[in-house]
Amino acid sequence: MSSSTTTSRTTSLRTTSGRRRTRAGIVAGATALVLLTAGCSGGTRVGGDAPEAASGDDAGLGDVTGEIRLAYWGSGSRVDLTNGVSDLFVAENEGVSVTPEFTDFAAYFQRLNVQASSGGMACITQLQGRQLNDYAGQGLLLDLQPLVDSGAIDVSGIPEDVLDTGRGTDGALYEIPYGAAYDAIMVNTTLAEEAGVGSPADGWTWQEFFDYARAAQGSLPEGVSGVNLLGGHPNTFIEWLRGRGQEVFEGTEAAFSADDVVEYWSIWEGLRGDGVTISAPDRAAEAAQVEQSWIAQGRVMSDNKPGNQIGQAQGAIEGAQPGQELTTVQLPRGEDGSSSTVLFTSGWSIPRSCDNVPTAAAYIDFWINDPEANALFASNNGAVTNTEMLQAQLDDESLDPATRQTLELYQEIVEDEPPTVLYPAGYQANFETAFQRAYEDVALNGADPQATAESFVENLDAALASA
Amino acid sequence: MSVREGARAGGGGVGPAVARGVAGDPQEASVPAAPHTSSRRRREALAAYAFLTPWLVGLVGLTLGPMLYSLYLSFTRYNLLSPPQWSGLANYQAMLADPRLQDSIRVTVVYVALAVPGILVVSLLVALVLARGMRFLPMYRAAFYLPSLIGASVAVSFLWRQLFAGDGVFNALLGVFGLEGRTWIGDPDTALLTLVALSVWTFGSPMIIFLAGLRQVPRDLYEAAEMDGAGPVRRFTSVTLPLISPLIFFNVLLTTVNSFQAFTPAYVISGGTGGPANSTLFYTLYLYQRGFAELDMGYASAMAWLLLVVLAVFTAVMFATSRFWVYYGDER
């Protein structure tokens, strides 16, 4: 075999091998592109056209059948109770199956965002007024008013003020609120009695609340503060504004000024400087869980907490400070007596991508109006908004004391016609943690309050405008 | 006998003669076996690609694809809820004027600068002690390694929170010595230090690697050095350190990259805020906030690519400088 032949064959083999490698490379590249394109297209499908069943005189009416997905936040007992309600619904509607999807509150919205980005939201999706416009503003949710008008969903049992918390900034009804949470002043009555200030009476003003904590401070045990440090607490700021009759948002802009923020902060800095509140580092180190919060550990005499946390807080303080008792009272009012309480409702929405609107509508209607379902769920996620169901629960003598107190206080609040706050898209992302961060900068780093407040309002407006 | 003959002698299949021929004379071997080798190689290649397919699909679909897509997203305005809109370099320009990004970079650099040396020094010291040999060595080794397995977990981060709270165990310990404690995790001056301490506590993985390396250092080198009059410090600097320098290189690289990507402890201890006052706002935590809390996935993607570039440059610099300080025993 000659050397030239050998070289020639070698070259030929190498060329063939090279071509094969090239072809393999092309195939691999094409596969990658196909997969990449598939990934891109999957990630950009958002919302969808509203189904025909969601408009017209018979909107939401039709065959109640097939499978629907139900997405909500919660764990433990709420999962069992929700499954129980779904079982009741399925028992009444043959041929229907309900697939639950649940996670804890923090992870819920991350999951929802991912689902929304791929058009995969569950047909019945739980939302709150604070995040509602993030989704409604992107055209992801159905306007449920036609379904109410057609009779597919009966909301006659829900007070108008409460129902309005499910509306978007455009006035459309995107959520049927079923559970209402509210903030209240939680007071350690044992410490208050020992300090000689007694339990506060309803109808107090914000100034009287601050004076109450200040008056108690001198007589409280060492290491216990009159009130938690709420300068960076976004809810308290909003409620303080509402008590003064001020709006919080106007469209996509803050309706308050930097001066309002500075005034609010100066109140809390004054209390902190006088030793009436817990220290700023201790406030920053406070655990998020209510059982570990300072009020539930007996470290502060009063705090602003969700009213429905009284049961958990009382349970925790019985372990941490045996013998001490907690109660909740309505938030302080404005100087003219107007209510400061803002309702935070949780409710059900239907995304535009839902392909089984009649069944979703039937489920929501069942959830808010069926006596057996409501007796079972027992206001597990805020006071039940249907007044008839609320009264039925209050009439139940076996109702536990903590839930009874939560429901009774809610009943008082609703009779007061509480103000409604419409949260613009981007509220959750750009207001809550930013407000806390800005105050921490003042309280912990000594930042100038005026400059910090101006920067906060400016950034908030810019963020809300582009949300 | 030619390779082809050898192949025939082996039954026409893939016989030992082929292997011997290829190994013995590459030029000769590459020619005569062409038809058989060609189809065999094709079959082998197909088999190889078939076996590689799961990995290739994963690489393209789960790694390269998302990476390239995130590169595209970094040039868009994308809030997850509506389709991305091309915005050119806007995200990168916004990064230049973002005070929170600057805070997160400062926090991360300080964390890396404190945690990496801390981890390496502690792990090396413990490895030196364990390398001397002792009873119950496997038990000690496991005990020291255990924090590495659980250190980045949510449970331990909660524990850390309790440990360094105002009424936590650490302050109680200080009280025994008459020292006044503070709220370590609530004070911007000390919150990051608690995270550094948590990180240093998880020194197990580099310690195991150091321990393995120390046991490979030839005893005769120590004996020779000792006979030359070298004391313990000189033996450590002139024998131990050079011989374990490849492991130091490996541990520095791995620990630094991991530290830049630290997330869970800051997320849990600060409740996801990076507080107090941004003092624990790790780069990855801020990236997460922008992407998933503030729904600014375009900006978050740009941040991810900046981190990738920084880590790539750091790794390249480490490799480039390694020839000046890393000693491999087989070097001549």
Image (tube, helix red, strand yellow):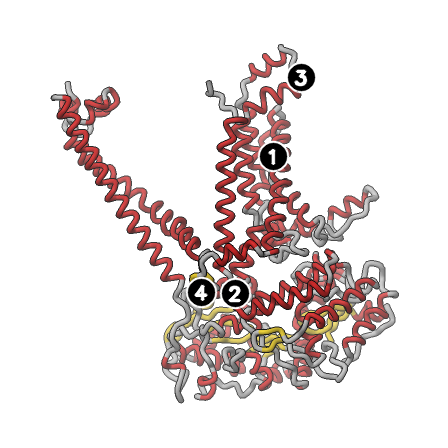
Q: Are marks 3 and 2 on the same chain?
A: no
State left or right for residue B43 relative to residue B321. Answer: left
Point out the tag, 2 or 4, that comes first from the N-terminus. 2
Q: Is residue A395 above or below residue A235?
A: below
Q: Which residue is mark 4?
A: A115
| Residue toward you, A58 or A33 | A33
Q: Which residue is mark 3?
A: B231
Tag 4: amino acid: Gln
Q: Is residue B54 above or below residue B252?
A: below
Q: Which residue is mark 2?
A: A109
State left or right for residue B151 relative to residue B16. Answer: right
Question: What is the spatial separation of the Cα atoms under label 1 and label 2, in whole angstroms?
Answer: 39 Å
Q: Residue at x 61, y 56 (%)?
A: B99
Q: Which residue is mark 1?
A: B120
Mark 2 Cα-neighbour bin, 10 Å: few <14, some 14–19, many ≥20: many
Question: What is the spatial separation of the Cα atoms under label 3 and label 2, in whole angstroms?
Answer: 62 Å
Quadrant location of the N terminus of chain A? top left
Secondary structure, mark 1, is helix
Secondary structure, mark 2, is helix
| Residue toward you, B49 or B297 | B297
Tag 3: amino acid: Gly
Q: Specify the subunit that label 4 lies on.
A: A
Secondary structure, mark 3, is loop
Point out the tag, 3 or 1, that comes first from the N-terminus. 1
| Residue toward you, A4 or A394 | A4
